[in-house]
Image (cartoon, helix red, strand yellow):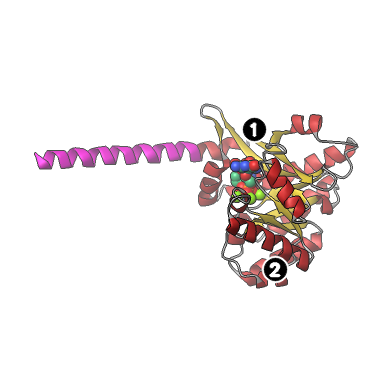
Amino acid sequence: RAKEVGRSIFQFYNKNMQKLNASEMILENGLRKAIDQNELELYYQPQFNLDSNEVSSFEALLRWNHPTIGHISPAEFIPLAEDTGLILSIGEWVITTVCKKIKEWHKKGYKSVSVAVNLSAKQFQQSKLAEIIKTAIDSNQIDPKFLEFEITEGAIQDAEKALLTLTKLKEIGVQIAVDDFGTGYSSLSYLKRFPIDTLKIDQSFVKDVLTDNKDAAITTTIIHLAESLGLAVIAEGVEEQEQVEFFKSMNCHKAQGYFFSKPLPEKEIIEHYLTK
Ligand code: C2E
Ligand code: MG
Ligand code: MG
Ligand code: MG
């Protein structure tokens, strides 16, 4: 009897595993075709200047509209794209699409709009990255200063290689931000050695910044650190008015989050946020 139960558990487990693999395979095959089938879309989240209350930059955030499953969150498919290497072609699509968008928006008269693009670790480590970025910039004839790249501390595994890549990107003339700052393992000496422009305070520190003394201490320290090093700083995941007041009072001049706006499709960005 015990044997029977054991076997049925085993079979159930086995069956479940097959199912899991199958759905993963479906997702992976879907992702392979997603670019060609026009299922990928970029949303844009405005970044606010807290002094002027103006928007001049947006973060591009990828969305996948699967024909049968519907919207799939990047938190789910970016890791899969990383594992399968598909992130490289998807990432190239994102870079090209953003450069086209910047050109289009500037042509329409929205002159000072800039856009931030997320780069995953694998993308950052690919040898052709600078070349891909340069090609996208040149073929759209945009000023590289309107393009920013967000990397996380996790992307910096080989410090010498990372320095070389960042130097190439700065030679092209784009901006560099460290995303989710404070959550990785990178050493502070990187901030000294690497050509970085902006620190993005991770939303995990912002969430309870008003009630948790440690979060308040960490965010304040990041703001001071940025200021002393001559870097820009932006708070991510700001959801409440009181958080806005906190960051203003701490001399953090930029913020982004649901309090201001969630990421929006291009049409709504043009309607609500682009000013000539
Ligand atoms: P991230 O770059 O740190 O982006 C911030 C995430 O927080 C976004 O989630 C955004 O929609 C969400 N967010 C913004 N404001 C708030 C807020 O006030 N509260 C809360 N709770 N969340 C907020 P999303 O769009 O699901 O993207 C998740 C992650 O996927 C991104 O984290 C980024 O690491 C990655 N990702 C997104 N688009 C791309 C892309 O084009 N390329 C690559 N390589 N990664 C991407
Ligand atoms: Mg980001
Ligand atoms: Mg982030
Ligand atoms: Mg993140």
Question: Would you say residue 244 is visible in this rendering?
Answer: yes
What kind of residue is marked 2? Leu
The residue positioned farthest toward the left in the image shown: 1
Mark 1 sits near ligand 1, with its Cβ under 8 Å away: no
Relative placement, left or right, of 233 versus 122 is: right
191 w.r.t. 239: above or below: below
Residue corresponding to mark 1: 38
The picture places residue 167, in percent across and down from the top left corner, at: 75, 66
Magenta-drawn segment: 1-28
- Indicate which quadrant contains ligand 1: top right
The picture places residue 12, in percent across and down from the top left corner, at: 25, 37
- Residue drawn where x is 87% and y is 40% of the image: 106
- Residue drawn where x is 56% and y is 65% of the image: 185
The residue positioned farthest toward the top in the image shown: 68
- Residue drawn where x is 77% and y is 64% of the image: 227
What kind of residue is marked 1? Asn
The picture places residue 204, in percent across and down from the top left corner, at: 58, 51
- What is the magenta segment's predominant secondary structure? helix
